[in-house]
Image (cartoon, rainbow, N blue to C red):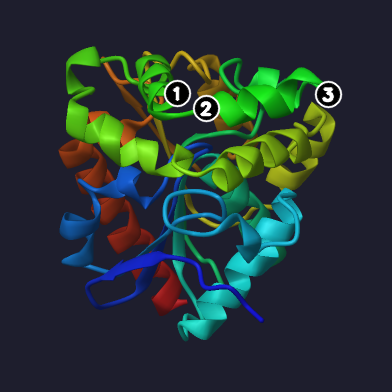
Amino acid sequence: MTIDWYIKEAGHGFPLVLLHGLGASSFSWRENIGPLSQHFQVLAPDLPGHGRTSPAAVADFRLETLTQELLGRLDEHGVAQAALAGNSLGGSLVLLLARQYPERFPALVLLAPAAALKRVPLIFYPLRLPLLGPALAALLGPWTARAALHLSYYRRELITPDVVAGYALTFRTLAQRLALRRLTCQIDPWPLPQVEALLGQVRQPVCLIWGERDRILPMRQASWLKERLPQAELHLLPDVGHAPQEEAPELVNEIIIAFLARSLKNYQEQ
């Protein structure tokens, strides 16, 4: 039996799928869904183990499994084609989908994608430890959300109680916390030559959005990616950290809408 994913939907038009990062949920797109839904049919899923989607929605948490399961959910929603936008872990999924199904996903928005990682972010790395990891996972809770936000956000004044509560949804049950550990253990970063090979196969138009104050994925990774995605347009946002869509939502919405208007128009004309 297929276990449903929670997918927030809004608007009409060409589909746009928003994929969140590790430890987040569709909540991270709360300032984007409304404005973007005025132009597109927006679908923002909670990945398994995150937000309102059960960890039991997938057999394992390998990136390849997550992409195939996501395809199944899009099929169920009748989404034959879509633009993709992904932040951090979501950006990794966007790149995998784009390489495998270029005709299905004709335009890509990457917001600080986790593409050139050497390791899992430090805040989650202890979960990978063989003996200590399960115990640490059991201890995760709302405090984890606050600590992660302090690392992700540059503008700390944006970390309000409501934002912490929205992120804490991912850590509310023991099953979710243990699933987060499984995910961190199963998403080993790829060697850079393998990443370069993947990027070399991506032909779709790409919009890269990066916060200049990103503490998790430094801005130099944006330049590295831009060199390997020559078709990409790069937007560097000052005084913004690892979640541009949350710290500068109005600007990010404008960038995405303008980019997709151009890219999808060219694609449809071809």
- Identity of the amino acid at label 3? Pro
The picture places residue 54, in percent across and down from the top left corner, at: 54, 59
Residue 2 is at least partly visible in this image: yes
What is the secondary structure assignment of the residue under circle 3? loop
- Identity of the amino acid at label 1? Thr
Q: Quadrant of residue 64?
A: bottom right
Work out whether 146 lies above or below 28.
above
Q: Disc 2 versus disc 1: distance between alpha carbons? A: 6 Å
Residue 231 is at least partly visible in this image: no
Number of marks in picture: 3
The picture places residue 40, in percent across and down from the top left corner, at: 27, 69
Few, some or many C-alpha atoms within 10 Å of disc 1 (few <14, some 14-19, many ≥20)? some
State the residue position of label 1: 144
Q: Disc 3 versus disc 1: distance between alpha carbons? A: 20 Å
In the picture, measured across the screen, residue 33 lies left or right of residue 83, that is: left
The picture places residue 14, in percent across and down from the top left corner, at: 34, 75
Work out whether 14 lies above or below 58.
below
The picture places residue 21, in percent across and down from the top left corner, at: 49, 40
Q: Nearer the viewer, mark 2 or mark 1?
A: 2
Q: Are marks 2 and 1 in contact (CB under 8 Å)?
A: yes
Give the mark nearer the N terminus: 3 vs 1.
Answer: 3
Image quadrant holding the N terminus, namely: bottom right
- Residue located at (62% from left, 64% from top): 57
Q: Nearer the viewer, residue 103 or 139?
A: 139
- Identity of the amino acid at label 2? Leu
- Residue located at (29% from left, 30% from top): 164
What is the secondary structure assignment of the residue under circle 2? loop
State the residue position of label 2: 140
Work out whether 2 lies above or below 179.
below
Q: Disc 2 versus disc 3: distance between alpha carbons? A: 17 Å
Q: Which mark is residue 130?
A: 3
